[in-house]
């Protein structure tokens, strides 16, 4: 079928598109902005309702859990489904199908995770979790080695300079293009009214400093270190609370909080659709993660005007800089406790760091990200057209 002048065709292959997860939101934002110029076919398990009028959907029906089964079935079924589409530029979210692709967006490099953690699975997790994570990681590593080769892929789209370096080390021979993710700086912005409402609902006084932790995979993101850091800070006499947004092994981390005297100080809020309000109500973000690529969470917190305290990983390094929009800290709990306590005692510095974080986040909006990705995809489409003539 011919397309109207100026339009091109793209096939997007991803496990899920839309929703609360970082990768899911990135591809949703791309579809919203590219649909005016591209005819998009989505091959996925889920596609958010509000996106279905913008793209043709080839649904892949696989179970969501356990994830290793979802991964294998999707790898096989989606590979067959995408061959039935009129592909145009084939854009895949990671190494998730076996046919050749034009561009793979890498939001997590599993070889990089293994390099950073030196373990297939979190050592402190229960056995079923270790088995599930370890098997998932092995499958993902095998898929990366198959898919990220010059004969299978034209361009690796890295979401930060850090992940670009990982890809160059582990998968040489494939072009790497850095296009950072964006952030919704209108949704994620300071709001004193929301701040007051949420604090009141959680019985948190204005003078208390709230540290926020957002995300899943609590072992990799080291919620345990965040809890220990807050405990060390409170021993110094400051009123610090820790809010945890996201899903994980709640019982295990509740026991840790209780063991360090934080049973009534750490609030587990679960997965939330209204996460923006918690950034607005908090005073800083804690991200002691072993591994990140871009970290949408860090950039959403920055856009909300709060400092980011993080491990020096991935795109967070570019965001924080030389402790200009937050602080980059090592793995020592005492260091985290000292930094948290210092900012609790110095609201003026906390505000200055938050203002700079907001300023930096404003430079990374979704429109700019979509323009850069569209330019990359257009280049690949033009090369395809020249070869087919």
Image: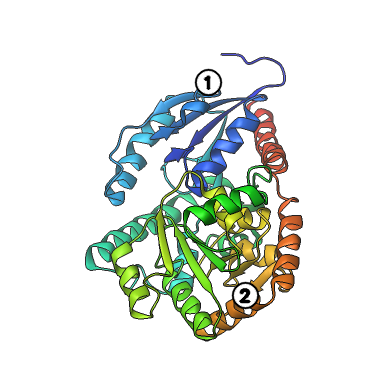
Q: Which of 174 and 194 is in front in this view?
A: 194
| Between 353 and 218, the one nearer to me in the picture | 353
Instruction: Name the spot of residue 186 as percent of width and height, x first.
Output: 68, 42
Q: Do the residues labelled 1 and 2 touch (CB within 8 Å)?
A: no
Q: Using a 10 Å C-alpha cutoff, classify the residue at mark 2 as few (fewer than 14 neighbours), some (14 to 19) or many (20 or more).
A: many
In the displayed structure image, the side of residue 118 where residue 212 appears, left or right? right
If the image is split into quadrants, where does the C terminus sit?
top right
Q: In this view, does 195 lie above or below 29?
A: below
Residue 302, how many percent across, how many down?
66, 58
Q: Residue at x 72, y 69 (%)?
A: 321
Q: Is residue 173 visible?
A: no
Cα separation, mark 1 vs mark 2, equals 47 Å
Quadrant of the drawing holding the N terminus? top right
Q: In which quarter of the image is residue 245?
A: bottom left
Q: Residue 53 carries which label?
A: 1
Image point (57%, 69%), residue name:
208
Depth-wise, is mark 1 or mark 2 nearer the camera? 2
Q: Quadrant of residue 318?
A: bottom right
- Residue picked out by circle 2: 344
């Amino acid at each position: 079928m011919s397309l109207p002048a100026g339009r091109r065709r793209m096939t997007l292959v991803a496990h899920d598109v839309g929703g609360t997860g970082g990768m899911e939101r990135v591809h949703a934002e791309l579809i919203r902005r590219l649909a005016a110029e591209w005819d998009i076919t989505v091959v996925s398990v889920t596609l958010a309702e509000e996106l279905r009028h913008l793209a043709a959907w080839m649904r892949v029906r696989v179970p969501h859990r356990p994830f290793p089964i979802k991964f294998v079935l999707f790898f096989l079924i989606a590979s067959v489904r995408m061959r039935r589409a009129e592909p145009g530029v084939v854009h895949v979210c990671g190494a998730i199908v076996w046919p050749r692709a034009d561009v793979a967006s890498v939001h997590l490099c599993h070889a990089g995770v293994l390099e950073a953690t030196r373990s297939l699975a979190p050592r402190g997790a229960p056995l079923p979790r270790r088995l599930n994570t370890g098997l998932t990681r092995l499958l993902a590593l095998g898929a990366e080695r198959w898919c990220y080769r010059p004969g299978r892929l034209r361009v690796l789209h890295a979401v930060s300079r850090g992940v670009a370096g990982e890809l160059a080390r582990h998968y040489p021979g494939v072009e790497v293009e850095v296009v950072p993710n964006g952030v919704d700086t209108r949704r994620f912005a300071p709001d004193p009214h929301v701040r007051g409402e949420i604090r009141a609902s959680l019985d948190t006084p204005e003078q208390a400093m709230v540290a926020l932790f957002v995300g899943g995979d609590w072992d990799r993101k080291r919620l345990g270190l965040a809890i220990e850091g807050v405990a060390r800070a409170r021993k110094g006499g400051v009123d610090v609370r820790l809010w945890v947004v996201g899903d994980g092994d709640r019982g295990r981390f509740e026991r840790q909080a209780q063991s360090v005297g934080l049973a009534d100080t750490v609030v587990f809020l679960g997965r939330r659709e209204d996460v923006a309000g918690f950034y607005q109500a908090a005073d800083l973000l804690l991200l002691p993660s072993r591994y990140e690529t871009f970290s949408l969470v860090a950039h959403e917190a920055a856009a909300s005007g709060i400092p980011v305290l993080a491990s020096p990983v991935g795109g967070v390094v570019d965001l924080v800089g030389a402790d200009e929009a937050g602080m980059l800290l090592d793995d020592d709990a005492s260091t985290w406790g000292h930094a948290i306590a210092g900012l609790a005692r110095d609201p003026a510095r906390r505000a200055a760091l938050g203002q700079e974080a907001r300023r930096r986040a404003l430079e990374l909006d979704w429109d700019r990200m979509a323009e850069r990705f569209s330019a990359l995809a257009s280049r690949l489409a033009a090369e395809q057209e020249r070869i087919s003539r």
